[in-house]
Amino acid sequence: MENKNSAKILLQLSNIKKTYKKSEEDEHLVLDGVNLTISEGEIVALLGRSGSGKSTLLRIISGLAKQTSGEAIYCDEPVNGPVNGIAMVFQTFALFPWLTVLENVELGLEAKKVPEDERRRRALAAIDLIGLDGFESAYPKELSGGMRQRVGFARALVVEPTLLLMDEAFSALDVLTAETLRTDLIDLWQEKRIPTKGILLVSHNIEEAVLLADRITILGSNPGKIIAEMSISLPQPRDREAAAFRQIVDEVYAIMTKRPRGTKMEAVPLSYRLPYAHVTQLAGLLEALEAEPYSGKADLPELADQMGFGVDQLFPLLEALDILGFTYTEKGDAELTAAGKEFVNSDILKRKIIFADHLKKHVSLADHIKRVLDERPGNKAKEDRFLTELEDYFSEEEAEKVLQVAIEWGRYAELFAYDESAGILSLENPESVENDE
Amino acid sequence: MKLLAQQNINLKVKVNIWDIIAFLLVIGIITAFAWGSKQMTVHYTPGQEVELSLNPLNLPMYALRSVLRMGAALIFSLIFTFTYATLAAKNKRAEAIMIPVLDVLQSVPILGFLSITVTGFIALFPGRLLGVEAASIFAIFTSQAWNMAFSFYQSLRIVPKELEEASVLFGLSPWQRFWRLEAPFATPNLIWNTMMSVSGGWFFVVASEAITVGKTSVTLPGIGSYVAQAIEQKNLHAIGWALLTMLVVILIYDQILFRPLVAWAEKFKFEMTESQDTPKSWVLLVFKRTALFQIITAFFYKTWSKVIDAFPKFSKPSKSLKPEKAVNNIIRTVIYYLFLFAAILAVLYLIPHFILKGVEHEEIIKVFFLGLLTLLRVIILLLLACIIWVPIGVMIGLHPKWSTKIQPLAQFLAAFPANLLFPIAVFFMVRYRLSPEIWTAPLMILGTQWYILFNVIAGAAAIPTDMREAAESFGLNGWKLWQRLLLPAIFPALLTGIITASGGTWNASIVAEVVSWGSVKLSATGLGSYIARWSEKGDYPHIILGIVVMSIYVVFINRFFWRKLYTICQTKFRLD
């Protein structure tokens, strides 16, 4: 390992803050005081749940977005727009479907006015390097997901970036493809066959981060700020099954499931961002927890692995179950509560009653909706009414999401009914509404 | 769904202040134009009258002239599309007014202000046929441009964010970005809308070649004027020849232009899976397999790339992130709103002043009543067309083999200018003494009913096989099957078809409510015939009144009926 103090600093973020303005006086804080340094020779992974602002941070670094305050310095120059020397690989590949593989790769060079001959030569070399030989004249449509992301890599690498940004670059790929591509990338990096001096990868996949990175930075949510940093000194290639590797993964899980202070909340307030979790998935997870081999208590990495879940899928579910009081998650372990056990062992109707009970008790929003409907003559209310209330705490888009979650849970619990096309919540049973399907 | 005619239905239902401003502005511009034309009072120089011969041998030449007019209009429409839509998509402040204006323009009856523009253009090019040509081209332009610009604007609005980001990151200049990303992304939709607009445009080519405005009678050599002359001379044979010629022209257009272009545009579709059922064109296939063609396209592509990259002025590094200076911004905003405010005041003064100078107050109420009559006709016709074409369309759509054969035919029929068929209908109406009040009505929908048919076919063809099999396995049949599966499933497509047809029907009322055969003139009571009658007399206040009232009807029905319905069906009947 290189000595960190002597390595040149590629990128330095100091006290980055980002707010989105909703109106003149109403601001929504996305990133709060983020400090991050990337030195030459480093792969840094940025981990965080969805909503932690990690994508926003990446866009600030790449110059696509501007921070509200704080400074981003790349190679001694402040970032004020797209920078030569920084390239990005996108989650959705961002290929131009009307251009062939070769033309896609040439695109960045074309913009830089590289002469045609050199352009062609460098593009072919990059295609060669990334293993796309023979596909030069193919259109992205004709390629599989893995091959498409290879084009994405070739397009980023051909401009010989000093800093390579990866925005969930592997998450749209299937497990096998992602693994191959990761291995190929790390080989190129280790053998120094690419001129890239530093890599920043944003991910919600903990194992992926531990597999690739020299350092992991963990972003907490609401607002996004760095809650932990850890160095990984395991030599490459890393073995997923090695005890040291497993231990680091466990540690990261423990940090990411650490409860915020004062978590002994009876009910989450209206201002709580309800996690996006479907009822059927919640029930499924509870059942899995109750069954063998966990019998009520599971180690999260193991659980994620067995269910084929990434963090972005598993964490919202666990968060929801924690809120509802069906599980208790701490230090990388999830444990079924008594209520959780009772839920699993009940039939469908009983389950609904238990769920309704917990929903009213632990989720203020659901309870609030129910009360309002009870009080209203006709027991009806427009969803807009609740949205306006939620917009005190969330952006418009988030408010809609939160309400959607509350509505789904409430419908399952039969606390209230919902007519989507009219946007009306009511206490009425759906059966009494004629012709409404 | 590539088969829908009008893919750019603006979903905003709420009417805001911008809609009203836009409406006033559009009407204001037309009124100003009429006012200007009136001042000029040009008489068309006699002796310039074009001699038209009914000899069928002249028809190919006339057809060519008509096609050239169409081509010229298309070029102007494209230029308009690229500038207007791009400006609207890139500039928030401009967008607020430009899009409602476009929306209103789509609803203004084009044929109504043909008479106004003709005089204006003749005045612009005195003593030359060019003025008349320009007026005709302008009429065709107005039938195409709004729709195309709308489609382009909407495509620009939904360019995928990651592609936008990638091109900024790789340092493409705004100019390069436009041609490398935005224009290609918008291509499939634009081409489809362009081709649909051209199809609809034949109607206006025919209608705009022979116009009488007051003392000015204008004839341009072309298929439309040929037919007009044939009507005057009661020559059925000549009409037959004209129909045949038009058929050939559209067949050539369909095979050589429409289908190859639509098939070619597949390349630009933003989808990552290759769809099974892609449009095909034998012409394109032949071209693609020809070596010469490949050399030529490669050459064009290269030159084009060079042109794109060779604009140093536009090739400034991509947008800097520094915010615009606040003071500048405020000043610009103030100037912009002052200007807009002044324009509105002028319009509010101009319209009543202009109209009331030549029209009695009671006339306004009468015109609204006439509008009601035409509205009644439009509604009945649309209902009838649905009753006829929905069952047929569904039957066809459910059989993939039929639908691939009949779908192009329906599109072809939609392109055929129905006004060429009017004389035949009138001939029978005269012979059998049929009441024009009822029997001119079907003429209004003759050309637009096909939109309903081919949208229904497309909708029915898109019903997932799973759903049909599920319905079958439950033993759903007869009316229950229609009620539970078929009608809801095709509803969005049907609605798109009806909306398109409805717009076209209003427009057609201006030429369909007054028809003639030789010296016999048949006229139905309605807003269309009102506009037509006053157009012929060249009485601008009455024409403007008619146009304003018709626009009000169309805009209101669009806003408060069609779009509301469309929004509901988008949330309720979507098949995904």
Image: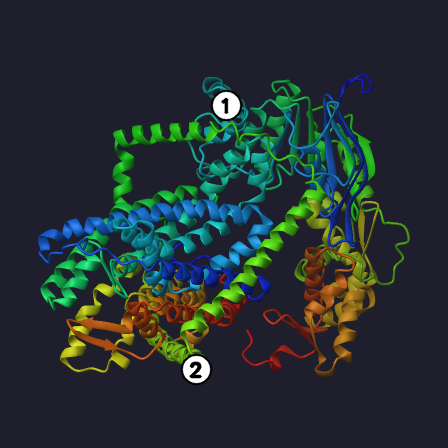
Q: According to the image, what is the colour scheme of the structure?
A: rainbow
Q: Amino acid at mark 2?
A: Glu
Q: Amino acid at mark 1?
A: Ala
In the rendered image of this protein, does residue A285 appear above or below residue B384? above
Q: Give the residue drawn at x 80%, y 59%.
A: A271
| Residue A375, quarter of the rendered image | bottom right
- One can see residue A170 in this view: yes
In the rendered image of this protein, does residue A419 appear above or below residue A50? below
What residue is shown with label 2? Answer: B362
Q: Is residue A200 left or right of residue B157?
A: right
Q: Give the residue drawn at x 46%, y 57%.
A: B8
What residue is shown with label 1? Answer: A123
Kind of element beneath mark 1: helix
Q: Return the mark for residue B70.
A: none
* Number of other residues with Cα within 10 Å of mark 1, as a class: few under 14, some 14 to 19, many 20 or more: many
- One can see residue B198 in this view: no
- How far is mark 1 from mark 2, CA to CA? 75 Å
Q: Chain of mark 1?
A: A
